[in-house]
Image (tube, rainbow, N blue to C red):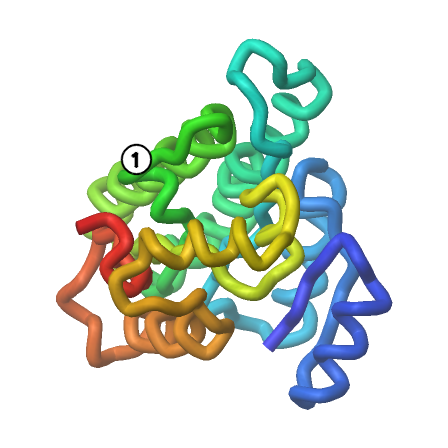
Amino acid sequence: MLIADINGEAAAAVAKELGARSVQVDVSKDASVNAMAATALATFGRLDILVNNAGVSHLPAPLDDISEADFDRVVAVNMKSVYLTARHLVPHMKANRAGVILNVASTAAVSPRPRLSWYNASKGWMVTATKSMAVELAPLGVRVNAINPVAGETPLLKTFMGEDTPEIRAKFLSTIPLGRFSTPEDMGNAACFLCSDEASMITGVALEVDGGRVI
């Protein structure tokens, strides 16, 4: 397993904990993603699973108040990264006629929250990209799925809420029928299933892992 992150030190720390390898990468830059792909293939010789997990948001604000810099960052990290990893790693999967790609989208793709318009749109793009990739790559033996997490205890939570107070948390939790934020384990369990042989007949889905948020 190769853990790639723009924070190279954090990636190395997690990799050490899991007994994996790590690499520093800026997923919005072609040369950086190309180097990451080369490292992965040189290290392991074969790529079976690709997880596109990088994501950022802008702070909640009226859609016409979001700066061009914030918009460009959301597009580069949430959208362009999926294109770049596909550009550099899908040819390998095609050659093997096997592989699984998992894109981490969001409930924002299907149940948008106000004042997060461009983040919502980027995740909607990811769901459409997932379905399009799945249709194109299925005849070549490659499956492509996505998960739509609800907000969880990650650094993005404060970004989504604008500020982190007990009142705002309570308001946010009131929209999740199961009554709690998601955990990394929730996401990991769903991801492991979709990437496993048990899901060999599943491609092109965006699985909501959201405690009922979008019902």
Relative side of 39 to 138, left or right: right
The residue tagged 1 is 128
In terms of depth relative to the viewer, which is nearer, 202 or 136? 202
Relative side of 22 to 94, left or right: right
Kind of element beneath mark 1: helix
Circle 1 packing at 10 Å, graded few (<14), some (14-19), many (20+), is some
Rendered view: 56 above or below 67: below
Residue at coordinates 80% horizontally, 74% vertically from top-left? Answer: 12
Residue at coordinates 21% horizontally, 43% vertically from top-left? Answer: 135
On the question of residue 15 being in view, the answer is yes
Residue lying farthest front? Answer: 167
User: How far across and down, in percent of the image, does residue 176 sit?
Assistant: 32, 58
User: How far across and down, in percent of the image, does residue 134 sit?
Assistant: 26, 47
Residue lying farthest right? Answer: 9
Relative side of 140 to 12, left or right: left
In terms of depth relative to the viewer, which is nearer, 68 or 175? 175
User: How far across and down, in percent of the image, does residue 192 sit?
Assistant: 37, 76
User: How far across and down, in percent of the image, does residue 204 sit?
Assistant: 22, 50
